[in-house]
Image: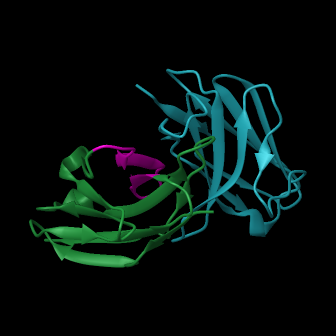
Chain colours: A green, B cyan
Amino acid sequence: AQSVTQLDSQVPVFEEAPVELRCNYSSSVSVYLFWYVQYPNQGLQLLLKYLSGSTLVKGINGFEAEFNKSQTSFHLRKPSVHISDTAEYFCAVSATGGYNKLIFGAGTRLAVHP
Amino acid sequence: GAVVSQHPSWVICKSGTSVKIECRSLDFQATTMFWYRQFPKQSLMLMATSNEGSKATYEQGVEKDKFLINHASLTLSTLTVTSAHPEDSSFYICSASTAGASTDTQYFGPGTRLTVL
């Protein structure tokens, strides 16, 4: 079984500052890793995903994440945030075999202040 | 591309009634659809997985007789909450993918907010 821990429930940050949202996972098998963003009263939008290959993954809206197998982490970063980045961010994992059942973390609320 | 819609976007019903929520893949064929439930300020919890033409697979603790899932075509899945009660009030989100392989991305619908009075 897999599990995901998002270490921060809320992250306040000023506009144009860098941000890192932390995600750690636990799994006895190989996993794929995902970051999704959810705006208020909306569904989820995929930001980026790690399947294999380069451990640094670039996604939409200027976000990137780095897969660290030894630390079982997949932290999300953005060098300069905008007010419009205010949203809920979810880290998720799925096992590499079988169908793509996603296990989500509890989410991190990113609040960008002017 | 890869748009998933849900209808209705919100619904209010009386306790004891049944509510049907539709999930459609608008521009692709979805061999697998997923239904999630999200409580306020919490994460998404997978309720069930459905493959077109076969019975849904429910997660542990989800009542299959209460949450009826039908995946009759490659573009439509429905979730029916039967005899709804206030504790069923939640945000229900569906997602769809094109195949069963883990590498395939799930495309999420905008969600349906259910309020049971």
> Does the segment drawn in magenta span residue A43?
yes
A30 or A58: nearer the viewer? A30
A101 or A87: nearer the viewer? A101
Quick check: B71 above or below A78? above
Location of residue B55 in the rendering, given as x and y in whole percent from the top left corner: 83, 36
B18 or A48: nearer the viewer? A48
Q: What residue is at 64 percent from the left and 37 percent from the top? A: B33
Q: What residue is at 86 percent from the left and 51 percent from the top? A: B64
Q: Quadrant of residue A8?
A: bottom left
Q: Which residues are magenta?
A: A32-53
B57 or A56: nearer the viewer? A56
Q: What residue is at 47 percent from the left and 30 percent from the top? A: B3
Q: Main secondary structure of the magenta part?
A: strand
Q: Is residue B110 left or right of residue B12?
A: left
Residue B116 seen in the current view: yes
Q: Quadrant of residue B95?
A: top right
Quadrant where the image shows the N terminus of chain B: top left
Location of residue A56 in the rendering, given as x and y in whole percent from the top left corner: 23, 52
Q: What residue is at 22 percent from the left and 62 percent from the top? A: A77
Quick check: B14 above or below A62? below
Quadrant where the image shows the C terminus of chain B: bottom right
Residue B117 seen in the current view: no
State how many labels appear. Answer: 0
> Does the segment drawn in magenta span residue B22?
no
Location of residue B67 in the rendering, given as x and y in whole percent from the top left corner: 81, 50
Location of residue A34 in the rendering, given as x and y in whole percent from the top left corner: 41, 52
